[in-house]
Amino acid sequence: MPLPALPRWLAVTEVDGQRCAGLVILAGVVLGAGLVQLFTSLGGQTSRFSLELLALVVLQLAGPLMVSLLAILRLNPDWQERSRVEGRRAWRSVVLPAVPLGALLMLMFLASAMGAGVLATPRTDITGELRELLASLRSSDVLRTVIRTSVFLAAASAWSLRLHRIGLRQQRDAVVIQNDSLLQSVTLVLVLKLFWIIAIDPIRLGLPA
């Protein structure tokens, strides 16, 4: 008996995830390895402390913002095409998949950054280093970061979809629509980031215990 087909929004999530995964993982690897090398070589920090600083940067400073911006850059043309083809029903293939997609991409980014950071440390005991790092991560911090990324990406996709609809109704040039939606979606994510750290979840500068 054949397995039932996935709901459309889950199938779209899978496709969009495949499109964004390579870019997100590459960014995580570059950030993780680069920051750990910077902290250990130029800052003179220990491997453990450097990895804790990396976790702070990924979870509380750069992670959700970077992941959301990379996904917007990669998916904005696809959102525009879905808006043109599907009309009012496009939210099912744009906004709905953005929620699980943001969570999945953030976890990919976190894993790639932490993995690259561990490999970039001068210590030879990689397994022990990784075990210590995982023990220092608080599940509540990871959960908040994942939720924040999902919110950012869903809000950006909804705003982008709205601009695409308006542009299509006004018969504007497709390139102009795409550029405007990209710029405004990125701006929206930056504003949401600022609002989040001020009003909802202020950045805690203390390192994991």
Image (cartoon, rainbow, N blue to C red):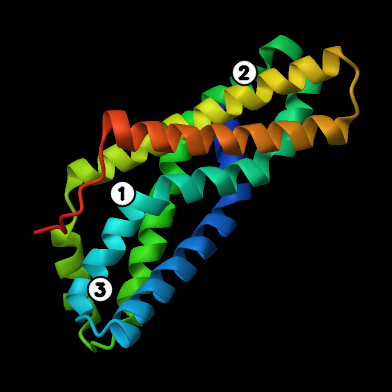
Q: Which residue is mark 1?
A: 60
The picture places residue 24, in percent across and down from the top left corner, at 52, 55
Q: Amino acid at mark 1?
A: Gln
Q: Amino acid at mark 3?
A: Ser
Q: Quadrant of residue 104?
A: top left
Q: Quadrant of residue 11?
A: top right
The picture places residue 61, in percent across and down from the top left corner, at 36, 51
Q: Earlier in the sequence, mark 1 or mark 3?
A: 3
Label 2 or label 3, whichever lies nearer to me, is 3
Q: Earlier in the sequence, mark 1 or mark 2?
A: 1
Instruction: Report whether 63 appears left or right of 6.
Output: left
Q: Earlier in the sequence, mark 2 or mark 3?
A: 3
> Element type at marker 1?
helix
Q: Is residue 18 visible?
A: no
For label 3, the crowd category at 10 Å Cα-Cα, with few meaning under 14, some 14 to 19 and many 20 or more, is: many
| C-alpha separation, residue under disc 1 versus residue under disc 2 | 29 Å
Image quarter (top left, top right, bottom left or bottom right) of the C terminus: bottom left
Q: Which residue is mark 2?
A: 91
Q: Which residue is mark 3?
A: 50
Residue at x 17% of width, y 68% of height = 131
| C-alpha separation, residue under disc 1 versus residue under disc 3 | 15 Å
